[in-house]
Amino acid sequence: MFQELAPHDPHKKCGHHYAICLDLKNQRFEVLDSMRSEADADLTSHAEYFINNLKETWNHHYENSKVQIRHFPIEYVATTKQGNRHDCGFHMLEYLAKWEGRRVPVITAGMVVELRKIYTWN
């Protein structure tokens, strides 16, 4: 997910990346954020808005499916918080690559340096 942090200010074009995972096995949505927690109202309102739209879309397109997600709760997964305000994209990509529903991937500043090299090279 990408959340614009100053949507009403045309001069501040900054945002934040975080991950929302649909866990069909455990029947829940999981939110992983490297800067914020469930206590942050901006995070919860943004995530809930997206998830509610996804539930509505799922119901519209898969109403006859044996898998229904409208009752799935949202779990805000505790993550290690990043040490700055600009590496959230790297954290989100690592969450998407390595999250399997149990152990939160640990992302260090050194890993972010290496990821920058890999993404630049590619």
Image (cartoon, rainbow, N blue to C red):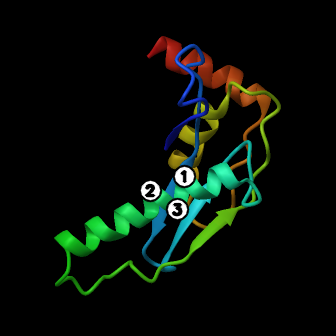
Cα–Cα gap, marks 2 and 1: 6 Å
Residue type at numbered disc 2? Phe
Question: Which quarter shows the C terminus?
Answer: top left
List x then y, in percent, for residue 109: 78, 28
Pointers 1 and 3 in contact (C-beta within 8 Å): yes
Residue 46: give its label: 1
Name above or below for residue 62 compared with residue 107: below
* Residue sitting at x 16%, y 84%: 64
Say whether marks 2 and 3 touch (CB < 8 Å): yes
Residue that carries the numbered disc 2 in the rendered image: 50
Name the side, left or right, on which 84 lies relative to 29.
Answer: right
Label 3: which secondary element:
helix
Left or right of 84, for residue 65: left
Residue nearer the viewer, 84 or 46:
46
Residues tagged 2 and 1 counted as in contact (Cβ below 8 A): yes
Q: In the figure, 34 relative to 58: above or below?
A: above
